[in-house]
Amino acid sequence: MKAAIYPGSFDPMTYGHLDIIRRAAEIFDELTVSVLNNKGKSPLFSVEERVKILQEATKELPNVKVDSFSGLLVDYAKEKDVHVIIRGLRAITDFEYELQGAQTNRILSEGKLDTMFLTTSLEYAYLSSSSVKEIASFHGDITQFVPEFVAQLVYEKYGHTAK
Ligand code: ADP
């Protein structure tokens, strides 16, 4: 069975993430989308909230599982016995950072963990969780960037009522 892990912050999940999830789920038999519990960042949504959002958004995709992890991705992948990591590439600005992560994981895993990149669909090329948060904080319209139920949750975090 071909399995892969798509790790990320997903704070919150956007249509850009969902596009990568859908496409990766067609390539692999099983895809685990896993929320990184990164102590260094102060997220808008807790890990549990982010997991719930992803579960709701992927409930129609039978081969997609949602999980969370902390610590090193190589250790997590080893524990799951998965050898492929999925990452999304938007613009050239993502490239340097992603290349570094991919090389580091290959070295740390002694060549056992590879990273596959899916390039963003053009309509989501400029979409990021941080821009969604920034727009929502000023009560701008984020409904074209995230599913409706996610938009409401984001607005609630900023003390706005539904748009
Ligand atoms: P990170 O894991 O870097 O903290 P994210 O949760 O935002 O950040 O992203 C997880 C993965 O999804 C990364 O590989 C990122 O490049 C990718 N990604 C984020 N937004 C998009 C998008 N709009 N289109 C394609 N890939 C994306």
Image: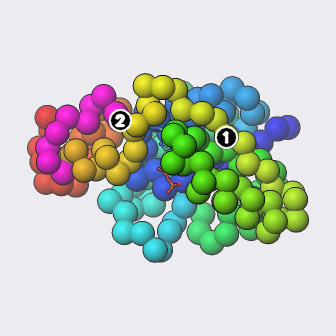
Compared to residue 24, the image places residue 37 above or below, namely below
Tell me: is circle 1 under 8 Å from ligand 1. yes
Q: Which amino acid type corresponds to the residue marked 2 in the rendered image?
A: Val
> Is 53 positioned to the left or the right of 61 in the image?
left
Query: Going 22% across and 55% down the picture, which residue do you hit?
Result: 157
> Is 130 positioned to the left or the right of 91 in the image?
left
Residue identified by numbered label 2: 146
Query: Going 32% across and 40% down the picture, which residue do you hit?
Result: 150
- Horizontal and vertical percent for residue 158? 18, 54
Residues in magenta? 137-146
- Horizontal and vertical percent for residue 30? 72, 38
Q: How far apart are marks 1 and 2 (CA)?
A: 22 Å
Q: Residues within 10 Å of mark 1 (few under 14, many from 20)?
A: some
Compared to residue 32, the image places residue 158 above or below, namely below
Q: Residues within 10 Å of mark 2 (few under 14, many from 20)?
A: many
Of the 4 image quadrants, the one containing the C terminus is: top left
The mark found on residue 117 in the picture is 1
Residue at disc 2, secondary structure: loop
Of the 4 image quadrants, the one containing the N terminus is: top right
Tell me: is circle 2 under 8 Å from ligand 1. no
Compared to residue 18, the image places residue 36 above or below, namely below
Q: Which amino acid type corresponds to the residue marked 1 in the rendered image?
A: Phe
